[in-house]
Every structure is written in structure tokens, then in C-alpha cells.
Amino acid sequence: MTESDHSEENLDEFMLKASNILSEENNPEKKLIINSLKEHLNSIYQEKSEMENFFKTLNNIIFSNSTTTPNKISNSKPFKLYPILFSFNPKNAYYYVDYFLTSLQMSVSCEENNDELPILISVFAEVIKSFFCEDSNDLLIKKNYLLEKNKKNKLYEKFFNFCNNNIKSENKIEQSFGCLLLTEFVEKCPLIKDQKNFENIFKLITDNLEDHWFECKLDMLNCTISLIFVTKKNFKNYANVCLFKILDFLTDEDWMKKKLAINIVYALAFYCKEEIMKVKDNVVDFLNALKDDPVDEVKQICIKTLNFLEEDGADINNNKNKNKNKKKEDKNLEENLDDYNDDNNEEVFNDINGDEERKDNDANDIKDVDLVKEDKEVIKEIDNKNKENKNNDTFDIEINIKNKEMNEKYGASVELILNQIKKIQETQNILNNMLENVKEAIDNNYTNLNERLKILEYKVDKRNINRKNS
């Protein structure tokens, strides 16, 4: 791909070729075309007019020029270029996001584009990842081109408002499109966990669930589930409000709404146990009316949720008193073991065994320390397996078995030590994975440099040929 291929008269052709190649899963030219796109954008990033022309050209080849059906998509493949183009340099691409959002709005405004909307939603998700996720394999790009915090916040507002404006539309297709985009936004943007952002989205969801005129409540229930899964335990302060908002859907005529509402109850019970258990009896009354629902999918999830509530409620009641007593007993020991590692394992045992004064003062500690001393060799054996065993699954199984046996025999003291050993193993695995990722990134950079070198050699050869011909 030469410089002349990117001239104004050939830009349409170049983009069409790029979008076709990138849409083919196993096309061997993918890397070359990506590098060519990156090279071209890098050459025009400083020229605002050329950048604007680039994105205008991209939108022009997406839409047809029909006067009878304006904004009809003639080719959806070029849409997939957006996340790739934005990922090259998010810091600069930030200024051209409006071209992408405009193309989305144009698409949803034409009913003949409805079949293309799933593709646009997936492209939107990838664009969110391009700007907000810091998982690039290219270390240079990650270091130099990532978006600054203040720009991320502004971009967050822009995407949120785009979703919100569609949700507020009187057009049902635009409402649904907005809900689906919001769901992807919730799942892909880490800034959702910020308290203010979370509250705005929670309010947007609950307001529309209560709005009698809002037509896409099914999509909004789906979005609610995503919000619970993403925020997990941080959702607990809003669990009861959310539960109250979705109770009416448990008796809705639409079985899909009933099913999603029960799924929300299950998610709340899983991530916000204490809050939901306070109103467990009321929830169970609602669910009991649905366990014989004629729709099998509703009945199954209802029974599953009832069983979970009953089992978890029993566990909470049985463990509440145990946890209160055990918390004080384990607190000091857990603090002492926080910095436990392979290097000081022997030192910990020596300190425990040599502390005669402590034994005289605390009879309960004497029992725990003596038991640990007697089984010191067992602990060392597990520690050695931690270093030697390369199979994580096998190691976890063995640790669990030992943990169970020794916990029954010696109580909480040994369990805490074993948990620390397991944490060390997990940390070691994380470090090994990070090392592999760094190696892979270095290999990718080396490959990219070789490919760029080939492109440059090709250009030099072509220029030499052109000079000879002239």
C-alpha cells in the first residue's frame, strides 16, 4: 500500500479494501492492512482537515446517496474500521468520536437499517474498549497514546448522553437501540464503577422501568442485570430499591419480563445477600406464586431462586453466631500472617514455639501453638509442593484436601496459614502470566517492525522504478 494509494481520489477504494479484508476472519493480509491504516493515520494526525476528510470519507462509503431512503446503509463493513482506527491513538482519536456517533444516529433513523443494528451495537462495544480499556499488546501505544483521565471523563459523558438521548426518544426502535447501547456501555466501561456515574445510570434505569409510556422495559431489565453483575457487592446500598422497582414485573403478562425480573432477584440475592434476606419472606411469597408457571423457563429459574434463598438464608442464620465468635479469635492471628511467605516460614514457627511467656498467659493459644508445632512437617511438605507443582488444578485439589483434614484436626490457625501459602502460589502464577504477556508483547512489536520494514522496502523499490520510468 503506497502513499499514492491514500490520495483523495483513492481513499474510498483504500477504505473499502481495508474493510473487506478485516471482515474476513482468516485473511493473511490483515496485519499488513492494519499497519497500512496505522501508518496513514500517523501521517495525517497533525492535519485536522485531512483527519476530518478521512472520517467523512468513511461515513460516505457506509451510506448510500439515495434520495428516497436517506441514511440507508449501503455497506456496514466499514463500520468495523472505527474501533481499529480509534485504538491506534485514542488520545488523538478523541477529537473525532462525533463522526462515529453521527453515523450511528443516522443508521438508527432509517427503518431499513434494522437488520444492521446488531453489528452497530457490537462495533459500539469495541469502540468503548478502544478508549477505556488499557489492555493493548503494543507497549509503546499503551504508554504514549492512552487517553488522559479528564478526557476519559468527558468522553464518558458524551457516550452516556448519546445512550440517554436515544432512550428518551419517542421512537421505539431508537429506545431499544439506546437500551442495548447502554447495556454494552455498562459492561465495557470501567468508569461505571465511579459512584456518581453509577447513580446516574441507576436512576436512568429505574426511572424508565417505572415510566408507563416507556416501551422497551425488557431491554432495560437486561441492562439492570448487567449493572448488578458489573458492580457486584457495591450494588448492596441500592438492592432494596431495585427489588421494589421490579416487583411488578414478577406478575407481568409477558413471560420474558417475568423471567428477567426473577433473574434480577437471583442476582441480588447472590451479590447482596444480607439486604435481600431482610425482606426474604416477601420475596418468597411472590416467587411461590410463580413456581407453577405454565412457561417452563419461568418455572425453572423461579425454583432455582427459591432454593437459593432457602439454602442461603439457613446458612446465614447458622453462621451468624459462629462468625461473631470466630472473628475476635482469628483477628490477631490473621494480622500476624498477612506478611507470611516462603522466606520467613521457619522464623514464624520459631517465634511461636519459643514464646514461653505467651503460653503462660493464654491457655487457648497454647493449644493452637502446640498443635502447629506437632504438625510442622506437614506444613513444610505443603510449602514444598507449592514450589514444585506446576499443575495449578492439581495443587488446588491437594490444598483443599489438606485444608479440610487439618482444619478438622487443628482448627482455624492452620487454615489461615494454608490460605497464606495458597495466596503466595496465586501471586506467583500472576507474575508468571505477566512475564508471558510482556514476552508476547515484545514478539508482537518485533513482528510489527519487520512488517513495516517490508512496507518501506516495497515503497523504496516502487519509487526507484517510477524514477527510472520517468
Image (cartoon, rainbow, N blue to C red):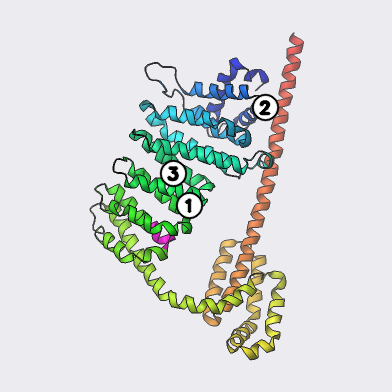
Residue at (56%, 42%) from the top-left corner? 153
From the top left corner, tell me how far across and down residue 372 is, in percent. Answer: 62, 82
Is disc 3 in contact with disc 1, using a CB cutoff of under 8 Å? no
For the residues labelled 1 and 2, say whether their Cβ atoms are less than 8 Å apart. no
Among the two numbered marks 3 and 1 on one chain, the one whose residue lies closer to the N terminus = 3
- The residue that appears at 71% across and 34% down in the rendered structure is 449
Of 450 and 274, the residue lying toward us: 274
Could you tell me residue 53's position as x and y percent?
A: 58, 21
Q: Left or right: 115 with respect to 231?
A: left
Provide the major secondary structure of the magenta segment: helix
Q: Quadrant of the C terminus?
A: top right
The stretch of residues the image draws in magenta is 266-272
Q: Disc 1 marks which residue?
A: 230
Could you tell me residue 67's position as x and y percent? 39, 16
Badge 3 marks a residue whose secondary structure is helix
Q: Quadrant of residue 12?
A: top right
**Which residue type carries mark 3?**
Thr
Q: Identify whether 399 is placed above or below 80.
A: below
Can the viewer see residue 377?
yes
Left or right of residue 430, residue 327 in this image:
left
Per the rendering, the mark at residue 300 is none
Give, as a three-letter code, the residue at label 1: Val
Q: Which mark is residue 46?
A: 2
Q: Quadrant of residue 311?
A: bottom left
- The residue to which callout 3 is attached is 183
Q: Residue at x 47, y 40 (%)?
A: 160
Question: Quadrant location of residue 273?
Answer: bottom left
Q: Residues within 10 Å of mark 3 (few under 14, many from 20)?
A: many
